[in-house]
Amino acid sequence: MGLTKQSTGHNALKEMFQVKSDSPYDFIVALAGNPNTGKSTVFNQLTGLNQHTGNWPGKTVTNAQGNFTYKDKKFILVDLPGTYSLFAGSAEEETARDFICFGKPSAVVVVADATCLERNLNLVLQIMEITDKVILCVNLMDEAKRKKINIDLSLLSRKLGVPVVGTSARSGQGLEKLRETIYKTAHGEIQPAPVKLEYSREIEKAIEELTYTIEAAAGISINSRWTALRLLDGDPAIQKSINDFLGFSLIENKEIVQKLNKARLMLKENNMNTDSVKDQLVYTIVRKAEELAEETVTFHNKDYNQMDRKIDNILTSKAFGFPIMLGLLGVIFWLTIQGANYPSEVLAGVFAFIERKLTDFFLSTGAPDWIYGILVQGMYKTLAWVVSVMLPPMTIFFPLFTLLEDLGYLPRVAFNLDNFFKRACAHGKQALTMCMGFGCNAAGVIACRIIDSPRERLIAIITNNFVPCNGRFPILITLSAIFIAGSGLFSSFFAVLVVLGVIVFGVLMTLFLSKLLSKTILKGMPSSFTLELPPYRKPQAGRIIIRSILDRTLFVLGRAVMVAAPAGLVIWIMANISIEGMSLLSRCASLLQPFGNAIGMDGYILMAFILGLPANEIVIPILIMSYMSTGVMMELDSLDALKNLLVNNGWTWLTAVNVMIFTLLHFPCGTTLLTIKKETQSKKWSLVSFLVPTVSGILVCFALTQIVRLAGLV
Amino acid sequence: MNDRLIPLNLLPLGQFGRVRRLSAGGSKRRRLLDLGLIQGTQVEALCKSPSGDPTAYQIRGAVIALRSEEASCIMMEALKEE
C-alpha cells in the first residue's frame, strides 16, 4: 500500500505542530483568533492549563496545546498564534494558516473580541474560506456590555452560517456552551454551512475554471476553491506550503498551468492583473465584515472608547509620555527593593537557623569534613542565598509587571519608543520583546517571533540580552544598594535611580547596537510595521497574583535552584582542591586576574560570571563563596557584612559599577543561548549573540576603568 | 468635498478622513488592506507618539499605530465632520 500523499503531508505537519498525546484522542481542535482577544484565557479555561496571558498583541509565541474531555470524548486543543489575517506573511500567520489548512482539525474555534468585532470578522471570514468546521467564539462579552455594545449573536450565526458562542472567558461564562458546541461540531451533530463569499463575475469564472482541475489533481484533501484563489492571487509563500502538503507542485501540473493561464488571460481582458485580483479578494472580505458588523452590532454609547482615548492622550503625550514610563518603572523597582528587604532578612534568618541545625547534625554524626563542606557550605548555602535574595523581589516584581501587562500598557511603551527603534533601523515591536526580556531573556528571544522581517528579528534576538532579566536584577539591586545608595533616608530612592540608570543605559546600548548591526552585518532599512493599541482592560488582581507567582516566579526560581545546588557543589570543590598549595579556584582566578584588572574587576569576578553561565542568579553566591574560601569564614547576615567582604577583597565603587555594567553586558545565560540557537537555526548567529554583548561589555568596562584611573578618581 | 487628496500622515490629529487609494504595492499593500484600509474606509487621527512618530489611528473600531512611511502611502480625502 505505502503512504499516500495525503497521509505523509498530514503527518509531516502533525510533527511540525507537535500534536502529542500520551493517550488516544478523538478530535483535534484548533484555536485561532486575532491577538489580544483573550484567546489564551479561553484556552486556559478549556484545558485548565496555565498559559500566560497578557494584554498585548502577539502573546502566544509558541504553539501551546492542551486537552480536555467533554462527555465521553477527548479533545486536543492547539492554540495557534494570534493573527489578524492569514495573508500578510509573518511566520506566525504562516503557522496558523498551515495548521488550519493542512492540520485537518475537526473544528476551528475562532476567538473574536466583542468590543471590536468588525476587525475580527476579517480573520473569521478568511478561515471560513478554508474550512467549514468553524465555530465563532465572541469573547469579552463582559467588556462589550460595559461599553454598551450589543451584539446579536443568533443573527450573526445565521448570517455567517456557523455556530456562534458568546463568552466572557475570564469569568468562565459561556465556556460550557462552547465545549458543547465544539463537541457537537466535531461529531457532525452540528454541520456549519459557512456563507460563501461572492467575488466579481470574472473572478468567480476563473475560480470555476480552476476548481475542477485542482480537484482532479489533488483530490479532496485540500479545499479546491481556496487553492484556486491562492493560485490566482499568486502568493508564492502560500503556494509553497500547498506544494509541500500535496507533495507535488501545482504549477508544474500541465493542466493546472493551462487553466491558470487561461483564467489569467480572461482576467486580463477584463483589465485585471494579479494585483487587482488580490485587491478585490481583500475588498470583498473587508466589505463583508463591515456589512455583518453593521447588521449585528449596535453601539448604545457612541463614545464607548472615549475613556481609553483620554488615557492614551496622557500616557502618550509629549509632556508626560516618557516621564510616566520611567516613573512607573521606577515605582515598580522601588516597591520591589523596599518591599523585599524585610522578607529577605526573615528568609535569611530562617536559612541561617536551619544551617546551624544542619551543622549540629553533621557534628553529632561525626561525618567527614568534606561531606559537610560539600553539602552544607557548598550546596545548601548557595541554595539558601538564591532563594532568600531572589524570592521576595520576584514575588513583588512579577505581579506588578503583570499588572502593567494586563492593563494594556506595554503596547503604549512600544508606541512611545518606536521612533527611536525606527532610527536604529529596527522594528517597533522590539520594544515589546524587550519588555518580555525583563522577565527572562529566553522568553524575550522567543517573543521575537512577532517580528516578521527576518533581519529585524535577528537584531531583536541579538540585542535582547541588553535588558536585564530577573536573574540579573538581584545583582544590580544588591550592588546599587550597598555601594552607591549608602544608608539613610533616601537610600532606596538612590538605589532605584541607579537601577533605572542601568536600564536606560541598556536601552541606549540596544539602540546603538541595533543601528550598528543594521549598518554592518545586517544591512537594511526598517520594514513596514503596524502596532495595535488594544483597549485598556480592568486587570483581575487575584488572578494576576496567582498567575504571576505560579507561572513566572516559581518557574524562574525553580530553574535557579536547579542550577544553584550543583554550582555550589562545583565551586566548593574547586575552592577546596589544592594543587601545590593553591586551590583550583584561586589558580583559575589568578589566570584571569590581569585581564580582570584591566577592565576594572578581578579574576574571581570573571570566574563567577563564567561559572554563572547556566544561570546568572548564581553569580553573587559564587563570588561570595570564592572570597570566603580564600579568607576567613564569616556569617553573611546583612548587606553590611557583604559590603565588608567585598571591600576587604579590594572592591571600590568603580569595581561595583563595572560589575553592574558587566552584568548588563555579557554573554546570555545558557538557556537563552540554547533558545537563540533554536530560534535562529544558526550557529553563526548564536555566536554573534554571544560575542556582541560580551565584547561591548569588555570595551565599556575597559574604557571606563582606564578613564577613571587616569583621572585619579579611585 | 474638494478633490485634493492628502496622505494620511498629514491628516491633522482629531480629524477624520476617508481612504481614496493606496500608493503602496506588494506585502505593504497587503498589510494595509488587511487592516481594513480599503477605499471608502473612514479613519480618525488620534494621537502622536511623544517622539513624533508613529501616529495612532482609529480604523474600523481598532486603534492602530502606523509609522509615517506607511501612513504616507494612504491617500485620504479629508472630512470636515463625521
Image: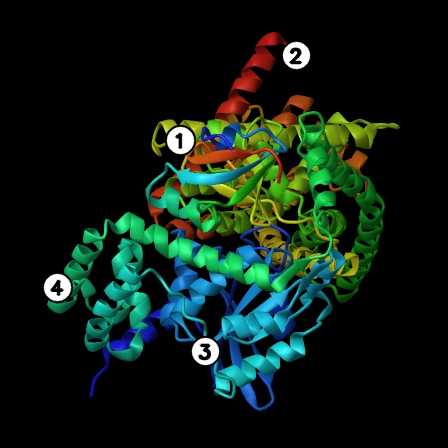
Numbered disc 2: secondary structure: loop
What is the three-letter code of the residue carrying label 3?
Ala
Separation of residues labelled 3 and 2 (CA atoms)? 78 Å
Separation of residues labelled 2 and 4 (CA atoms)? 80 Å
Q: Nearer the viewer, mark 2 or mark 4?
A: 4
Residue at left offset 58%, top offset 63%: A295
x, y (%) of residue A265? Answer: 16, 55
Separation of residues labelled 3 and 1 (CA atoms)? 51 Å
Please tell me in which quadrant of the rendered image residue A143 appears: bottom right
Numbered disc 3: secondary structure: loop
Q: Nearer the viewer, residue A317 or A701?
A: A317
Separation of residues labelled 1 and 4 (CA atoms)? 47 Å
Q: Which residue position is annotated with label 4?
A: A258
Numbered disc 4: secondary structure: helix
User: For the residue carrying disc 4, how many other residues have a C-alpha within 10 Å: few (<14), some (14-19), or many (20+)?
Assistant: some
Q: Nearer the viewer, residue A318 or B17?
A: B17
Looking at this view, name the residue that lies furthest to the front: B1
Q: Which residue position is annotated with label 2?
A: A713
Tell whether B21 sits left or right of A397: left
Identify the disc placed on residue A517: 1
User: For the residue carrying disc 2, how many other residues have a C-alpha within 10 Å: few (<14), some (14-19), or many (20+)?
Assistant: few
